Amino acid sequence: MQKFVNINQVYLTGPSFVTIGNFDGLHRGHQALLRQVIRVAQEAFATGAVTAPPQSGLITFEPHPLTVLRPQIPHFLLTTPAERLTFAAQLGIDFGIIQNFTQEIASLEAQEFIHLLKTHLNLAGLVVGPDFALGRGRKGNLEALRDLGDELGYTLHVIDPVTWTESPVRSSTIRQAIQQGDVVMAAELLGRAYHVSGEVVHGDQRGRQIGVPTANLQTAADKLLPQNGVYATRAQLQHNGVLHSFNSVTNLGVRPTVGGIQQRLETHLFDFPPADHSGDLYGQALTIEFIARLRDEQRFSSIDKLIAQIQLDMQQARQILHGK
């Protein structure tokens, strides 16, 4: 995939078929939309609607538009823009643009934004969902975009809403599930386990002291974390060009038994380290996939009772993760 950081930096000579949106989560609905972009581009070339091989593309935004339009309301992300492009590339999208979202971009009329796409992306087709609109005041609705297409020479393609177990797939629904700790439901709607990535940083090493060493993960401030609790997880570690995957158990919370006050994400990796690793994770990037919620965070009357519960958590996590 070709990756760009600004529409103005792109000059495509061949035709492109594009979709636009926040795509936070890159969930099943977004995936269906991206597959349709690829399909429409292929069909246009096959039928002679375009005479040169077209490219499929995605435009997303950083920061999230809500942080610019409603800065007083905190907004947490399911996926970073870079992660969205990674997932889109896996589906076969040819290029991705992470457009810096500013008040200037927000103030553009729909026609002005579409002119940018025609000038820089040689827009031949726009593929969107049924509720899509762009431009100042969201005046660029489907009817307006179809009229612009007739004027400027591109086609508009609208896909049907995507449902899963008879309910619409929406980022807001996934966000709510994660906030409630329902990582199984979130995974169903995402089409993959919800994950959090970050750098392993030094903690207070209490896990090591009780024989259960943990990796303390520092995550992005705007990344949505699940509800506090204990989870069966899978940890992904890139080392010496090799991707290692470990079953693991993760505690997310303030650790009330030891008087903690700051929220921490701490993961114990089973069967670690691998043969080619020293076991030192500090400063390395780690990705945690949340597979199942085991229990709420709780305060224990003694460290011994905490250790006993941790052993039960580890056993339960191993049982859940076995064969997954």
Image (cartoon, grey):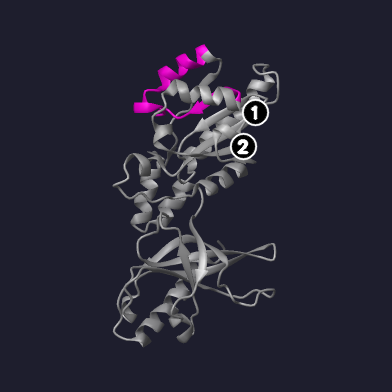
Instruction: Please tell me whether residue 160 belongs to the stretch shown in magenta.
Output: no
Where, by quadrant of the figure, is residue 50 drawn? top right
Rendered location of residue 98, percent (x, y):
53, 41
Work out whether 162 lies above or below 312. Answer: above
Counting from the top left corner in percent of width and height, residue 156 is at 51, 21
Residue in the picture at 54% in, 48% down: 82
Quadrant position of the C terminus in the picture: bottom right
Q: Secondary structure at mark 2?
A: strand
Disc assigned to residue 12? 1
- Observer-nearest residue: 60 or 5? 5
Give the class, few, some or many, for how many residues have Cα within 10 Å of label 1's Cα (few <14, many ≥20): some
On the image, the x and y values in percent for residue 103 come to 39, 35
Residue type beneath disc 2: Phe
Residue 40 visible in the shown view: no
Q: Residue 95: give its label.
A: 2
Do the residues under discs 2 and 1 have CB atoms within 8 angstroms?
yes
- On screen, residue 63 versus residue 91, left or right, reads left
- Please give left or right for residue 167 compared with residue 112 in the image: left
Magenta includes 130?
yes
Figure check: 286 above or below 114? below
Q: Which residues are magenta?
A: 122-151
- Could you tell me which secondary element the residue under label 1 belongs to? loop
